Amino acid sequence: MEDVTDLARDASPGGSDRAYWGSQVVRMNMFDNLIGNRDRNQGNMLHDAAWNLILLDHSRAFGEGTDLPQKPGRIDEGLWARIETLTPGKLDAALGAWLERAEIKAILDRRDRMRAEIRSPGQ
């Protein structure tokens, strides 16, 4: 990739880019919880000059574990609405060539854990 910067050198934007960046981080956290990515760190996150977030290295994701890598915080309503529509059939059609049934089931189990956290009092 060209013209990108890793977060180890440039941690967060200022000014008008801050809200946009924040919304991307929320979406990243939701996605990482859904796929069980337990290795998110500044070394596998890049951004371009417009502060578009680019995620690298999902080698520790899509396992059979159902724990959420992090406690759900803020949510993106649009992304959450799409996550809620996931079914075993949809996931199998999209990911069945690469994931075992237990790994697909784990995605749905993590989604259910996310739902429980989102709906729990205090959120």
Image: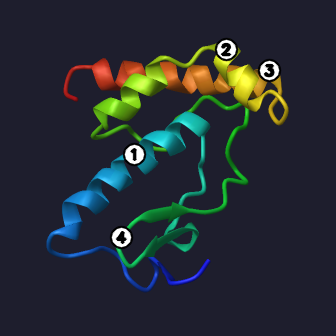
Dot 3, crowdedness within 10 Å: few (<14), some or many (≥20)? some
| In front of the other: 40 or 77 | 77
Disc 1 marks a residue whose amino acid type is Arg
The residue mark sitting in front, 4 or 3, is: 4
User: Which picture quadrant has residue 76?
Assistant: top left
Dot 4, crowdedness within 10 Å: few (<14), some or many (≥20)? some
The residue mark sitting in front, 1 or 4, is: 4
Residue 51 marker: 4
Q: Quadrant of the C terminus?
A: top left
Residue drawn at (60%, 38%), measured in percent from left and top?
Answer: 35
Dot 1, crowdedness within 10 Å: few (<14), some or many (≥20)? some
Work out how far the residue at label 1 is from the one at label 4, CA to CA, in angstroms.
Answer: 14 Å
Dot 2, crowdedness within 10 Å: few (<14), some or many (≥20)? some
Work out how far the residue at label 2 is from the one at label 1, CA to CA, in angstroms.
Answer: 22 Å
Residue topped by disc 1: 27
Residue topped by disc 3: 101
